[in-house]
Image (cartoon, grey):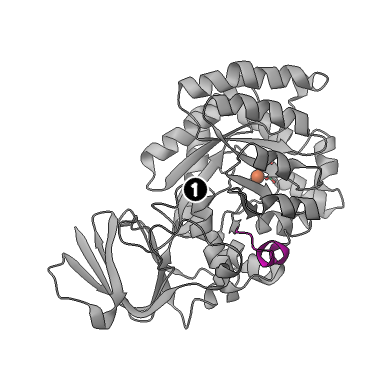
Amino acid sequence: MSILFTHIKELLQTRPKSELKVVGNAMKDLPHIKNAFLRIQGDTIVDFGPMHDLVVQETDEVIDVTGKIILPSWCDSHSHVVYAGDRSQEFVDRLNGLTYEEIAAKGGGILNSVQVLQDTSKETLFEQSVERVNTLIQLGTGALEIKSGYGLSTEAELKMLRVIKAIKEISPLKIKATFLGAHAIPKKYKRDKQAYLDLIINTMLPEIHAQKLADFVDVFCEKGYFSLEDTEQVLEAATLYGLVPKLHVNQFNAFGGIALGVKHKALSVDHLEVLNEDDIQVLKGADTIAVALPGCSFFLGIPYTPARRLIDTGLALALASDYNPGSAPSGNMNLTVSLACIKMNMSPEEAINAATLNGAYAMDISEHYGSIATGKKANLIITKNLTSYRQIPYHFGNNPIHKVMLNGVFVA
Ligand code: NIG
Ligand code: FE
């Protein structure tokens, strides 16, 4: 099946296939072609350019998209979209004055979701999660990383990872799975954290490896959760099983998590709401990409990742939703892009680069996703009539999307 889009008002993020991320000042530039065409063959982009260069060729379907913008679908590199139930009661508790950390200290927070997930069957967990994933597709997400981390027992962590695998099998989304067994210390191990780390290292990791259930490993490296030493134990063991780290670091405290991630060749370090100068220096020259999660800062009322400092110092930045029931109960990447502009002073060009190609880099899939290049997957957002791509972040909270194509097929 071949499809030709014609009269595209702006075709965004057109780059050579070999360009795998956008760094520092270069993020200010969002390459695009005005009045463009785009040709798809099967699930792949095969040609594009300005309309005046279009060569007539036999095509199964021609779609005139006058007035509309086409861009690569969002690449959301950090989510916890597989979870059970919700935490709207804690949301109200926070509105009444409790902090996220106080709720967690009382046994709520992540451990609340753990209890519910352990009591939920695999089938129900799958149903609840697929519904969320389908909403994300409508909102333009084409690639998604999903973490475990609400199981915290061997059985429940495996249940989560199997649900992620099952979603991968039925969904048109490109999905990457991350093992986040070290997300919180389960109640049972409250007084013996090392015993829980041993369970992760000696039981969970070998089983996950044997069943090929994860691509990446993550640890919540934070005061009251996992220290640098704890994190290092998990990373050393996981690396032996070929799992590349993607870390939760510097959400509330800065104490060297980023340097540890870089040392262990982490693909990404995520959150970074609290950053000191050493953290920034250590990222210079590293392949590890910084990931900001503005939806979490918005929802919890905590500081935003200092995007200007990171980008102006020459670093690459990706944007992700952090979709989860506690700190970011929305996976809407259109809103993430808006928040990045409004609250982090990123330009629309920087935010779109961060949510497409750099997001793909943070999942190690930017060879095939995240930009418009011949040979890349036809994962596209076709917008409603817009005057320019600047209207995507400008109309915050609105849905700018007319249609979504994944793997060359219209899915929304
Ligand atoms: O990325 N900070 C740790 N993990 C999640 C929140 C998990 C939760 O509250 O359920 C996050 O913000
Ligand atoms: Fe997270």
Q: Indicate the quadrant containing the N terminus: top left, top right, bottom left or bottom right.
A: bottom left
Crowding at label 1, few (<14), some or many (≥20) Cα neighbours within 10 Å? many
What range of the chain is rendered magenta? 307-316
Residue behind label 1 places its C-beta within 8 angstroms of ligand 2? no
Location of residue 24 with respect to 201 vertically, above or below? below
Q: Indicate the quadrant containing the C terminus: top left, top right, bottom left or bottom right.
A: bottom left
Q: Can residue 160 be seen in this view?
A: yes
Location of residue 368 with respect to 67 vertically, above or below? above
Q: Is residue 93 magenta?
A: no
Residue 288 is situated, as x and y percent measured from the top left of the image, at 60, 48
- How many numbered markers are drawn? 1
Q: Mark 1 points at which residue?
A: 144
Residue 330 is situated, as x and y percent measured from the top left of the image, at 61, 54
- Give left or right: position of 33 versus 390: left
Identify which residue is drawn at 55% across, 69% down. 26
Prevailing secondary structure of the magenta residues: helix
Q: Image quadrant of ligand 2?
A: top right
Identify which residue is drawn at 64% across, 51% down. 329
Location of residue 135 with respect to 165 vertically, above or below? below
Residue 19 is situated, as x and y percent measured from the top left of the image, at 44, 59
Q: Can residue 37 be seen in this view?
A: no
The kind of secondary structure element at disc 1 is strand
- Give left or right: position of 162 versus 185: left
- Give left or right: position of 214 versus 327: left
Q: Does the magenta stretch include residue 312?
A: yes
Location of residue 267 with respect to 114 vertically, above or below? below
Judging depth in this view, the residue of 108 and 297 nearest the camera is 297
Q: What residue type is labelled 1?
A: Leu
Q: In which quarter of the image is residue 369?
A: bottom left
Identify which residue is drawn at 78% across, 51% down. 278
